Image (cartoon, rainbow, N blue to C red):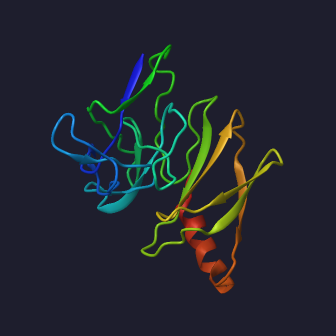
Amino acid sequence: MLRRPFLGKGDRGGSATIIEGLDSVTCSNPPPLVHIATLGMKTYCTACKSEGVIAPSGPRHPGTGPNGEGWALSGDINLCGCSPAPVFRAERNMAQIFTGYEAGRHEGHGVSSAVVPDSGNHWILFSLRESGSVGGLRCVAYFADGSKQRGTFSINNTVRFERNENGSNCSHIEFHFTENANSLDSVTELLLTSITG
């Protein structure tokens, strides 16, 4: 059995600290009261002295917070300039439970801006590192096997594509602007410079 507690504002992973949490979802068992976090929420790393975001690693049950983002769980990682990526840890009663789990099967992988974890649980996450928000920006990701998938950037400038059993590499992304089309070049440049690996 694997138990993955929910992460919250103030939780740490090595040199990284979660600096955001949901106003409407809290946990106080054990004290103190903590604002629960979701994927893509902001972090700060003292080692590389940069802001980052929470990125998923390992198994998780379906479901999202009120902001539409997946829940952040103990064992998830920090996307910052560090390699390997810091791993967040927490202990609280609010948790996801996985039965029949084999220890070590879903080990986290060091990443910076694009992640494809263990086989059978593929996904890829892109994060734009800028001060403004491109929340609502629509895009289409094209993959090496010829498939494509639509996505929308969150208010935290992240977009995640669930790939299920398909771990094909992403070959390119097209942005679909409804307005401010002249900003395409700057957004494309930001995305491309944020992808490593």
Q: Quadrant of residue 48?
A: bottom left
Q: Quarter holding the N terminus?
A: top left
Viewer-nearest residue: 88 or 150: 150
Q: Residue at x 19, y 34 (%)?
A: 30
Q: Quadrant of residue 184?
A: bottom right
Viewer-nearest residue: 65 or 157: 65
Evaluate whether residue 84 shows in this view.
Answer: no
Q: Residue at x 35, y 44 (%)?
A: 86
Establish if 135 lies above or below 73.
below
| Residue 124 in picture, x, y percent from top left | 60, 47
Does residue 152 appear to the left or right of 47 in the view shown? Answer: right
| Residue 78 in picture, x, y percent from top left | 39, 48
Residue most extreme to the front: 24
Establish if 188 lies above or below 194.
below
| Residue 169 in picture, x, y percent from top left | 70, 46
Establish if 159 lies above or below 27.
below
Residue most extreme to the left: 31
Establish if 189 lies above or below 114.
below
Q: Residue at x 64, y 84 (%)?
A: 180
Q: Residue at x 54, y 68 (%)?
A: 135
Q: Quadrant of residue 72?
A: top left
